[in-house]
Image: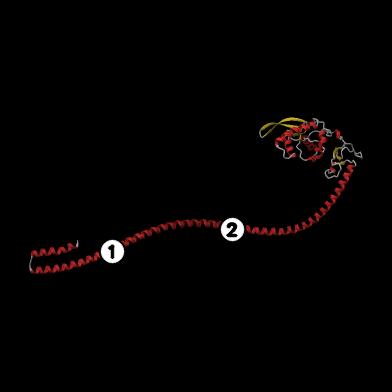
Amino acid sequence: MTIAGVIAMPSETAACETTADPTETDVQTLTEELEALRRRTDQLTDRVDDLEAENDSLEDENAALRTRVQDLERETDLLESKTDDLETSTDDLESRTGDLESQTTDLESRTTTLETCTTTLESKTDDLESRTDDLETHTTDLESETTRLENLATAAINHSKANKARIEELQSRELEKGAHLLADNVDPHELDLADTHLERIHKDDDRTYYRLPETDDPLQRGSVSLAHGDLLPIQQLARMDEDMLRSTTSSLPSRLAAKLWKARTDPTAGDDPWNDGCKNVREYVKASDLKHWIRRQEPGTSDTYAKKLVSRTIDALLDLSKNRVAIRRKRERKNGLEYTERRVLITADAEIPGETTSQPKTADVTGQR
């Protein structure tokens, strides 16, 4: 019910009463009632004003509360977001803590192991230091002994050099007198001779000797198996040293043929490309091996020129040996491919002066090395 309705109700009642009984008493009563109603109306009006003021205040408070609620909701959302982040961070920290605890356990285990190893190493170090001290003492003793032995060795070497010089002088004088000296006892490169070339000969006692060329043994001990003139040209050239060989022939293939023959017969010649044969072949050399041998003998020779020298050297070898060697072609296999290669052969029945015919050494089943 509104305020106007409350005010209107007494007026209507008064009108009805006036209409029913318009006496003076009634008028006075009605006036009193109206006055009472007016006071009541004023009170209600004041109360309504108070309520409106209170309502405005409540609405302001309500608006403030609503604003506060919105602020609190935003703060709550922010706190919830922070809480989620903190929970995630907490989970990460817990995971990392677990990993760190595991690593800590491993490190503690490794530390324990290292401590054990360190203790063992310290013990071994002590032992090594003790052994080092002993070795240093022993080394000092050995150094003293070595110094003593070096002094003795130096004295012995000096004495040996003096003796060797005396022996070489005696050998030189004896060779100049025509002596034949055993090859095993002579160092031909150290002798001081007017004729620097020594001839290597074989006697009927199957031993090798050195002498000056064409000199007879004054003691007439044994006879020389072959005279120089009985030798093949290739044998004569093979007995010469490098200088005499160059002065005798200017042909490089002939010199190479002589060196090749010397490598076969003289173990001291060094680089030997010959191979032991089998059956009716005493020795042989492959053309490919001969090419590499020529390049070693003549440094700087190209592969193409070495191939040409192989053919020329073989021709010279045939000529200078008076065809005591033979040339054969043999099929070879390398890396799955077949090819034909020349071989220089010395057969078992080849008549070579000064070389007795003997059965060749057996190398491999196929006769190749």
Name the residue: 19% across, 67% down. 42
Q: Dot 2: what SS?
A: helix
Disc 2 residue type (three-letter): Thr
Q: 29 or 182: which is nearer to us?
A: 182
| Rendered location of residue 352, percent (x, y) | 82, 32
Name the residue: 18% across, 62% down. 4
Q: Residues within 10 Å of mark 1 (few under 14, many from 20)?
A: some
| Rendered location of residue 278, percent (x, y) | 76, 33
Give me the C-alpha separation between circle 1 and circle 2.
73 Å
Which residue is label 2 attached to? 111
The numbered dot on residue 107 is none
* Nearest to N terminus: mark 1 or mark 2: 1
Q: Quadrant of residue 15?
A: bottom left
Q: Quadrant of residue 87?
A: bottom left
> Quarter holding the C terminus?
top right
Indicate which label's residue lies in the foreground, 1 or 2.
1
> Quarter holding the N terminus?
bottom left
Residue 45 vs 192, above or below: the answer is: below
The reply to whether the C-beta atoms of the residues labelled 1 and 2 are less than 8 Å apart is: no
Disc 1 residue type (three-letter): Leu
Which residue is label 1 attached to? 58
Q: 67 or 26: which is nearer to us?
A: 67
